[in-house]
Amino acid sequence: MTYLLTSLVNGLVFGLLLFMVSAGLTLIFGMMGVLNFAHSSLYMLGAYLGYSIGRWTGFWPALLLAPLAVALLGAFIERYMLRRVHRHGHAQELLLTFGLALIIHEAIKLMYGPYPVEYAIPAELARTAFSVNGFNVPLYRLFIGAVAISMFVSLFLLMRYTRLGLIVRAALSQPLMVESLGHNVGFVFLLVFAIGAALAGLAGAVAGAFYPTGPNMAEDLGSIVFVVVVVGGLGSLEGALVASLAIGLLTTLTVGLDWTLAGALAPFGLSGWAASIGGLFSITLSSLTGSLPFIIMLFVLLFRPAGLMGERS
Amino acid sequence: MPLDRRDVLKLAGAAAAGFAAPAIAQARPALKIASVETLSGPGSTVNRLWSLGLKYGIEKINAEGGWNGQKIVYAEYDTEGTTGGASQKTQAAIADGAHIIAHGGSSNIGGQITEDVRKWNLRNPAAKVLFFGLGIEALELTGAKCHYHFFRFATNADIRIRALVAGLKAENALGKKVFSINQNYSWGHDIQAALEQSAGENDFTLVDKVLHDVNKIQDFSPYAARIAASGADTVFTGNWGNDLSLLLKAVQAAGLKVRFATTFLDLPGALSSAGSAALGYFHAELWNPQAFGAFGQELWTDYKAKMGTFPSTSEAKSILALLFLQQALKTIPEASKIDVDQIAQALERTSYKAPTGDVTMRAGDHQIAWPIVVSKVEQGAKFATDGTDMGFVPVKVIPGGEVLNTVQASCKMQRPS
């Protein structure tokens, strides 16, 4: 019971963190029609900037300044890089973001060295929120969740109920029409990219203090975030939320399950036979935890290529 | 001042040597050591350390005169992180005339090189090479894959677990319930199997064991929950890199009262990212600067002066392997042709006096027997590690022979006749 409860909290928070990073990615995809390979690098950049700025200003101002700096960088990337190669087609945009990811990765290694830096949780949050039968749930974990939820709510309200949101949504689906109505679509795209970058930066600044801030964090999270976006449906914010939570919960809960195929055959009296064969039959579910998101992605692509809530196919 | 007979002879000898030396030196070949390591791409930062240690160690030996009247020649080859690349670069190193190939980074790549070297030596008996495993700890390398020209200078999973169990017992820190969490590949499997065996020989129960994906888990808190559910006193893990620091952080955040016994907590980045979560945890390794006394202190400061950083365990292990080799080479008469079989024989016979005790190379499977230092992470340690104020304080040094596993039955070594 303790295990189930703590795993639920852990899974939800991890899912929400995944959502923070994937929200920006899916927004930008909706806009550009291209996956931004540099997105998880912006997440890493947010963590490093949060760490560096935090040494001067303390944790809280850094939490605001780091995403802002990443947003500015995002705006710069959109205005002066992506827009220039846009007319050459999607492949060029894809290559550009891929190159950016490599450059950011190497630049981080040059400036901060190849090993993780000591980005610490502020003292006021380094406490235990509550304890379930002696198992502590850290306050910072809940803080990550709270930041993600407030981010989702404000983003949702902005997109759904404001005039700006209306224009953005219109520009994403019918850019030419919106432009002929006199709106500056270029600026809208710039804004979306900057917001997407800021979200990744914020996620990095918040999560970097909890998970190690190192030069591999972009690659570590990057692949899972792609899975989330694909499973949720490219371009769908709600889909990203559902997929993030599902993958977060699933990977957390399966850790404790030592189910095997051999065990599943027990009702047919075949478990002994299957276990004796070994191989695929004796792999425990818990040992597959890290691969589970990819297995899910495989099935989603096979049976619902547009993703759970995606419109494109 | 009149010269006596002895002085005259000395002078004559010096003169003769002075004239003859260039001719002999040209005739005598230099020993060539090739470091085949992953020097680019992911993992290169950690793997490069093995090469750096070799470079430093060879310069040190050369400063003392090298061997065979020549300086030892050192070259680096980049595997690019793949077994295919390792194969190619092994061939390149052999083509360049390497006598010894060394690799420390990965058991997987090491497994490829050892096979390549074995086959090369079978097909080219006139130009054999040796393969030195500096860090590769997979049991099969001295088991099913063992051969006469491979030498492991590092520990293996069995040795590490035996040492950790013995050290924790001596400190009364083992407890009755032990949890095993490891990465799901050969190394993790080896550690888990060693623990299962150890549970049979000692009075503790293995309450739960987990294998997880390598370098894929972002959130270890579910594993912390599983450790809590098991009620374990001590957690044994062979994890390294992110998998180790994330695990330690998650366990600390959950407020669990468990002790950890680790094998790779001393790699760069581990202690700094684990932070205070690592305090009081145990570690077993053949190298520990404090346990090595004056020798350790000297290496620590001299390495920093020459290479710019304090030596990590990887670098130190490269250097120690070379010192063992240097000891073996001293017993071989200088010759106009380098015979690696002769070096192999010398390695088997060598007894190296390390500050922690005697070191020998077991002839049966070419597994080295180093005394193992069991240490504990403490604040304000003499040798602060990884940019923190923490370090590894030795609690017990176990003689090599006591923790050495028996030669695996799968090792069928063909010795040259």
Image (cartoon, rainbow, N blue to C red):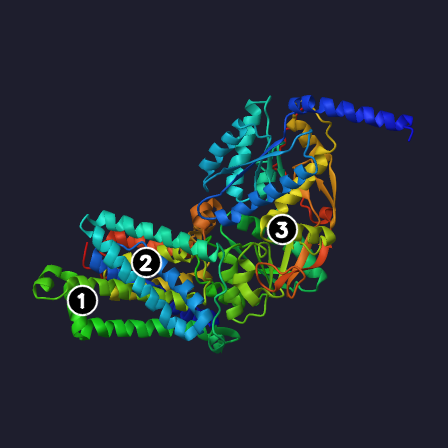
B332, above or below A230, in the image? above
Q: Chain of mark 2?
A: A
Residue B257 as seen in the image, left or right of residue A304: right
Disc 3 marks which residue?
Answer: B305
Disc 2 marks which residue?
Answer: A39
Residue type at the position of mark 2: His
Residue A139 as seen in the image, left or right of residue A223: right
Q: Position of residue A279 (x, y in %)?
A: 45, 45
Instruction: Report which quarter residue B376 is drawn in.
Output: bottom right
| Distance between mark 3 and mark 2 Cα atoms | 41 Å
Dot 1 falls on a residue whose secondary structure is helix
Mark 3 residue crowding within 10 angstroms, few (<14) / some (14–19) / many (20+): few
Q: Chain of mark 1?
A: A
Residue A193 as seen in the image, left or right of residue B158: left
| Distance between mark 2 and mark 1 Cα atoms | 20 Å
Disc 1 marks which residue?
Answer: A168
Instruction: Report which quarter residue B152 is drawn in.
Output: top right
Instruction: Report which quarter residue B369 is drawn in.
Output: top right
